[in-house]
Image (cartoon, helix red, strand yellow):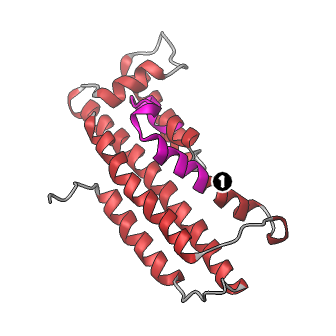
Amino acid sequence: MEEIKRSTECKYLERRIRELKNNFDFKQSINGISKRQSDRLKGLRLLCHAEFEDYFESVALKLLTLAEKKWTDKHIANYHLASLLICHEKIEKKDDIQTKVYKIITDYRQLVRDNHGIKEHNIKRMYEPLGYQINDFDAVFLATLSSYGELRGEIAHLSTKHTQQSFDKNDEFDKIDEILKGIIQFESVIRSL
């Protein structure tokens, strides 16, 4: 079976997630997990979410950088830059094309820097301006990302006394692995344009 091509960003993410899982691993008793183990799983979720978020932002910025390079080298707007030009709302008609392009690039970089999550609306906000439609991506994968983002939010923004989440190590590891598998399919969509 042929191995699916993965980006440098994806390979780094897989390595980092593997490290995190190893660092936070423990032997779970059949009676459930202790408070300490629960905290370890919470930490794992927070850190994995940060790595997933960084991945999506890095890929978006890489697409932008490639578009910018093509523009700088040859004054050719590739698909992603052309999409940004079409989507951008604040272009001054009086500006020359060079000024417009660099304003759009700067604004898009800021949009990615202002991202704070991996939910479906975060993916849509970052990737639709580059020419992808949200329905290009697997709906189950997007729902999984949104769910994981919500679970992370409960940990990050609520005190333990306000959350009723019960943890299971195997379930947590399975959620993480499911997202990693979805990212491989996500990358095939990214490469298709």
The reply, left or right, for residue 45 in relation to residue 76 is right
- Vertical placement of residue 110 versus 147, above or below: above
Q: Residue furthest left?
A: 1
Q: Which of 1/113 is in front?
A: 1
The reply, left or right, for residue 84 in relation to residue 150 is left
Residue 18 horizontal/vertical position (percent): 41, 74
Residue 144 horizontal/vertical position (percent): 53, 51
Write the start and end of the magenta stretch as one range: 125-148
The residue that label 1 is drawn on is 150
Q: Residue at x 43, y 55 (%)?
A: 55
Q: Which of 76/191 is in front?
A: 191
Residue 12 horizontal/vertical position (percent): 35, 65
What secondary structure is the stretch in magenta mostly built from?
Answer: helix
Residue 42 horizontal/vertical position (percent): 64, 72
Q: Residue at x 54, y 46 (%)?
A: 143
Quick check: is 83 in the magenta stretch?
no
